[in-house]
Image (cartoon, rainbow, N blue to C red):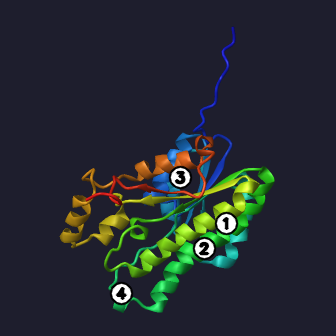
Amino acid sequence: MVESVVKSPYSLEGEVALITGGGTGLGLGMARCMVCQGAHVVIVGRREEQLKNACEGLGRTSSYFVHDVTDLDSADHLIARISEKGGPPTILVNNAGQHLKKNAVETTHQDFHALIDTHLLASHELVRACVPTMISAGHGSILFVSSMTAYMGMPRVIAYSAVKSAVTGMVRGLAAELSLKGIRVNAIAPGWIETAALRSALDNDPERTSKILSRTPMGRFGTPEEIGHVAAFLCSPGASFVNGAVLPVDGGAHMGF
């Protein structure tokens, strides 16, 4: 008797996942988890050495391209290069971003523009570049990275909070527009995750660190892989009816006391 092999509903075999800012932090955590589920993962970023080192750890089902997402006119070229080498992306993770910690009265319009370019305009250009081939393939998954600052008021992050709140609007608008074409759009709203970016944001600020941990019911920071496992799930067939969602992955911080 020959036993049938049932494919896991969480498998990403056959998928090509493009992850921006994939060389470190949350992006690398997501890349590791998607590789484990069978995807070919393409990471992009500005620093080649970081990308190269990341791919050495990810293994043979990964590759990288040096790319600055804020070079908005080059998104189509990036997708063409990726498609030529290993096939067009069927998963897009808009993870690249930058943080800004400034008092509101010190935050300039240039500061706002820098965050808008990275978090919103760059993400939109990559969506525009990826969607046509996703439609041709009959399926696709687009994942954004939001933030706890889109859920709660926090001091000294007015520009970051504003653009991450705007991400929610992009997710819902795109989900409504693209889902009948076989493309799901969702987001993760990470809590405070143990990365170099978090350490920089909390540098010399023990009061802020204590406040974050005190209002996180699980009483600790998360790990990049805890974000990565959820990202892999949301992009898998196991989440085939999840669309337009922004999922907090935060140890309960958004509802904790």
CA gap, disc 3 to disc 1?
24 Å
In the image, residue 141 above or below residue 197: above
Residue 151, image x and y in percent? Answer: 40, 67
The residue depicted at 54 percent of the width and 69 percent of the height is 167
Q: Are marks 2 and 3 in contact (CB under 8 Å)?
A: no
Observer able to see residue 150: yes
Q: Nearer the viewer, mark 1 or mark 4?
A: 4
**Earlier-in-chain disc, 4 versus 2:** 4
Q: Amino acid at mark 3?
A: Cys
Q: Which residue is mark 1?
A: 127
**Earlier-in-chain disc, 3 versus 1:** 3
Q: Amino acid at mark 1?
A: Val
**Earlier-in-chain disc, 2 versus 1:** 2
Kindly state the secondary structure of the residue where label 4 is placed: helix
Kindly state the secondary structure of the residue where label 3 is placed: helix
Q: Quadrant of the N terminus?
A: top right
Label annotation for residue 104: 4
CA gap, disc 4 to disc 2?
24 Å
Horizontal relation, residue 209 to residue 237: left or right = left
Residue 207, image x and y in percent? Answer: 19, 70
Using a 10 Å C-alpha cutoff, classify the residue at mark 4 as few (fewer than 14 neighbours), some (14 to 19) or many (20 or more): few
**Earlier-in-chain disc, 1 versus 4:** 4
CA gap, disc 1 to disc 4?
31 Å
The residue depicted at 20 percent of the width and 64 percent of the height is 210
Q: Which residue is mark 2?
A: 122
In the image, residue 60 above or below residue 22: above
**Earlier-in-chain disc, 2 versus 3:** 3
Q: Which residue is mark 3?
A: 55
The picture quadrant where one finds residue 172 is bottom right
